[in-house]
Amino acid sequence: MRSCCILYQKQPNPFKDKTQIKYKLFEQADVSIKVYNSLGIMVRSLINNTKDKGTYMIELNTKKLNRGIYYYVLEINNKPADTKKMIIIK
């Protein structure tokens, strides 16, 4: 099975205030990135667009989020492709 994409682990982790999430697409696709808290509740939808093949970065501002563990999920064509963990400190 051919891979569709790469979702990179963000660095540094943990972090404060804002960060960037990087991902790479190997072909054009409908892309969404959502952030979930440790209870599995979606707290942010960062992107929901069609993107061409390439590498992208999207900024996440955590000003209104509490400290704790969160997960960011990359969906390709409405199917989960990858999930990474991040920790917000204040």
Image (cartoon, rainbow, N blue to C red):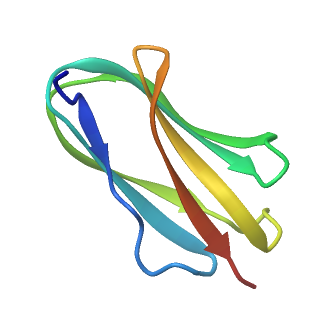
Q: Residue at x 79, y 74 (%)?
A: 67
Q: Nearer the viewer, residue 51 or 14?
A: 14
Q: Residue furthest bottom?
A: 90
Residue 14, percent from left and from top: 58, 81
Question: Between residues 85 and 16, which one lies in front from this camera angle?
Answer: 85
Q: Quadrant of residue 60?
A: bottom right
Q: Is residue 64 left or right of residue 58?
A: right
Q: Position of residue 24 (x, y in %)?
A: 23, 43
**Residue located at (68% from left, 59% from top):** 70
Vertical position of residue 17 compared to residue 10: above or below: below
Q: Residue at x 18, y 25 (%)?
A: 52
Q: Is residue 40 left or right of residue 8?
A: right
Q: Nearer the viewer, residue 68 or 65?
A: 68
Residue 65 sits in which quadrant?
A: bottom right
At which x and y percent is residue 79?
A: 48, 18
Q: Residue at x 63, y 76 (%)?
A: 17
Quadrant (top left, top right, bottom left, bottom right) of the C terminus: bottom right
89 is higher (above) or lower (below) than 25: below
